[in-house]
Image (cartoon, grey):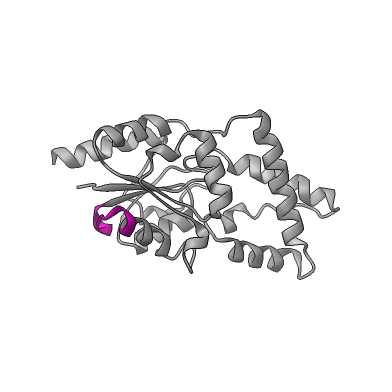
């Protein structure tokens, strides 16, 4: 029986991965650095791991902080004139959870300040009972720490938590946490190895309602 639902943010609640990748590309090319798409490697990881992966691929002189700051500046400029892009089915699912008194949390590797800005602007924050950010745990996904912390804040046993994720690292973290891993793919499709870890694969977030209803009826 599902007693809580834990959401990833980027690429799952918010359709931000493609846009952020374009801003990363622009920031790199402004510095004369050919862009490498490292999204499949860095999705779900905390900034320290993201920095390490970039330096491994670009070399030790890669200006990670400068490019990251420029990409964030481009995001902020974009959000002045555009709404935060939300994934299909998000609000029907959040409203369903609210009606059913099933608490929801976000567990994102994004740092608190950046994530809160997006969650507030998108109108998601009022639906969340708990929020766990990348700077609140020592180890990032694929380690289970961030999901276990969210379950603790929600007061729900891990085995009774459904995790909605779009990234392989997030699915591995949910599996290691002993939770129910449900994938809604975005940029990366699950391979055969990842398929073995999934409870279910969905096309839209609100399809999770059917899973919860099925469990209630069983």
Instruction: Give the answer, above or below, for where 10 lies relative to 89.
Output: below
As drawn, which residue projects farthest toward the right? 32
Q: Mainly helix, strand or loop, the magenta region?
A: helix
Instruction: Give the answer, above or below, for where 14 lies relative to 69.
Output: above
Residue 115 in the image, given as x and y percentages of width and height:
54, 47
User: Residue at point 70% right, 54% down?
Assistant: 68
User: Residue at point 43% right, 42% down?
Assistant: 184
**Between residues 145 and 98, which one lies in front from this camera angle?**
98
Residue 170 in the image, given as x and y percentages of width and height:
45, 55
What range is drawn magenta here? 152-160
Q: How many marks?
A: 0
* Residue 153: in magenta span: yes
User: Residue at point 30% right, 35% down?
Assistant: 98
The C terminus lies in quadrant: top left
Residue 217 in the image, given as x and y percentages of width and height:
14, 38
Q: Please give left or right for residue 43 compared with residue 89 in the image.
A: right
Residue 214 in the image, given as x and y percentages of width and height:
20, 38
Q: Please give left or right for residue 189 compared with residue 81 in the image.
A: left
Instruction: Give the answer, above or below, for where 106 lies relative to 100.
Output: below
**Between residues 138 and 88, which one lies in front from this camera angle?**
138
């Amino acid at each position: 029986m599902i007693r809580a639902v834990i959401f990833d943010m980027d690429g799952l609640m918010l359709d931000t991965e493609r846009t952020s990748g374009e801003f990363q590309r622009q920031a790199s090319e402004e510095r004369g650095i050919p862009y490498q798409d490292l999204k499949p490697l860095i999705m779900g990881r905390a900034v320290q791991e993201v920095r390490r992966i970039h330096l491994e691929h670009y070399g030790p002189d890669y200006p990670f902080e400068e490019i990251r700051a420029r990409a964030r500046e481009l995001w902020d400029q974009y959000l002045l004139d555009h709404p935060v892009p939300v994934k299909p089915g998000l609000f029907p699912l959040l409203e369903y959870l609210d009606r059913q008194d099933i608490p929801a949390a976000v567990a994102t590797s994004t740092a608190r300040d950046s994530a809160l800005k997006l969650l507030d602007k998108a109108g998601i924050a009022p639906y969340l009972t708990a929020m766990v950010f990348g700077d609140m745990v020592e180890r990032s996904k694929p380690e289970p720490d961030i999901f276990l912390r969210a379950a603790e804040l929600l007061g729900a046993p891990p085995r009774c938590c459904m995790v909605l994720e779009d990234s392989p690292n997030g699915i591995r973290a949910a599996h290691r946490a002993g939770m129910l891993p449900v994938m809604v793919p975005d940029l990366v499709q699950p391979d055969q190895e990842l398929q073995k870890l999934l409870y279910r694969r969905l096309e839209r977030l609100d399809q999770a309602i059917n899973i919860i209803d099925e469990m209630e009826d069983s």
